Image (cartoon, rainbow, N blue to C red):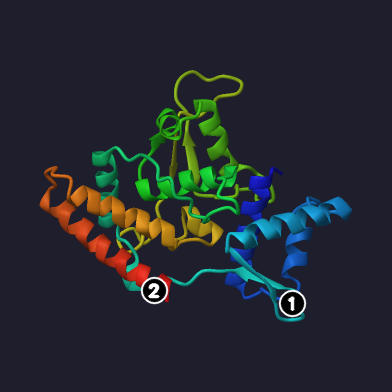
């Protein structure tokens, strides 16, 4: 497994443990044992400590918990139901992004790395967050353009999310590819998307995308980024249809209230 796959796998395992109520002194050991020998032996233990430290430095996990300072869990507050963005609000933000030609947000859903140098895992989760917000299929060529990388690299970044690894259905099961053109021995997809959640009107990203890794709510940096995007769209001078304007204002109110929750 690559370092990015390891970090994402730990996050998903912790998310699943939290849902089952199984976060306890044995969670760390259980995750290491489940990851098919990735953390086996002395070198594996060092790798585990580095990975846990990397996640802890970003404030994504809490370690040293009871009992006996062996507990580990994901961090982050739960978003109140009233602050979940609806499909129309997500769509309005996407329309604003397209209008401003903003592309993929530069803000990582996983917070800043120590030293401020973005890692591969940041690019992967930025793409994942964008896909879950988009609600439609996106060409790999367009992703490559936004990321300023070759198309093959864009595919490799997204493909990490579907890598078998520990999970037969991929790290994020709701990522799907579309293949076009002639059949070859090793076809490469041309488009990619994330399936929307069942509660499409109330919360279309619930259970999808970043939520599969335990990070459904926007981080503080993401919240500020989306509020800034909305404000730029509303003051850009472009003609915005009434229904989009109303949805942008509604989304901005929810995001502003969520920011207050995060700052408490």
According to the image, label 2 marks what residue? 261
The residue drawn where x is 35% and y is 42% is 136
Q: Is residue 218 visible?
A: no
Classify mark 1: residues with Cα within 10 Å, few (<14), some (14-19) or many (20+): few
**Residue closest to the far right:** 42
**Residue closest to the far front:** 115
Instruction: Give the Cα distance between marks 2 and 1.
Output: 28 Å
Specify whether 72 is left or right of 143.
right
Classify mark 2: residues with Cα within 10 Å, few (<14), some (14-19) or many (20+): some
| Label at residue 69 | 1
Position of 154 relative to 73 (above/below): above
Name the quadrant containing residue 141. top left
**Residue closest to the far bottom:** 67
Tell me where residue 3 appears, x and y as whole percent: 68, 46
Tell me where residue 169 appears, x and y as whole percent: 60, 48
Proximity of marks 2 and 1: CB atoms separated by less than 8 Å: no
Element marked by disc 1: loop
The residue drawn where x is 37% and y is 50% is 133
């Amino acid at each position: 497994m690559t370092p990015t796959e390891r970090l994402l796998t730990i996050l998903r395992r912790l998310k699943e443990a939290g849902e089952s109520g199984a976060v306890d002194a044995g969670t760390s050991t259980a995750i290491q044992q489940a990851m098919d020998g990735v953390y086996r032996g002395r070198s594996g233990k060092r790798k585990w400590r580095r990975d846990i430290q990397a996640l802890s430095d970003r404030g994504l996990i809490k370690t040293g918990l009871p009992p006996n300072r062996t507990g580990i869990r994901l961090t982050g507050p739960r978003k109140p139901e009233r602050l979940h963005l609806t499909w129309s609000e997500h769509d309005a933000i996407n329309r604003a992004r397209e209008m401003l030609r903003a592309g993929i947000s530069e803000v990582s859903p996983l917070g800043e790395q120590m030293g401020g140098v973005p890692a591969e895992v940041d690019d992967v989760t930025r793409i994942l967050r964008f896909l879950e917000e988009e609600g439609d299929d996106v060409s790999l060529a367009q992703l490559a353009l936004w990321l300023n990388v070759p198309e093959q690299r864009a595919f490799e970044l997204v493909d990490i999310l579907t890598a078998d690894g520990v999970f037969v259905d991929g790290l994020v099961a709701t990522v799907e590819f579309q293949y076009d053109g002639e059949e070859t021995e090793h076809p490469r997809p041309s488009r990619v998307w994330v399936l929307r959640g069942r509660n499409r009107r109330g919360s279309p990203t619930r259970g999808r995308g970043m939520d599969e890794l335990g990070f459904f709510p926007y981080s503080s940096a993401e919240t500020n980024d989306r509020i800034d995007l909305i404000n730029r769209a509303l003051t850009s001078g472009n003609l915005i249809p009434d229904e989009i304007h109303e949805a942008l204002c509604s989304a901005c109110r929810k995001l502003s209230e969520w920011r207050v929750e995060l700052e408490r």
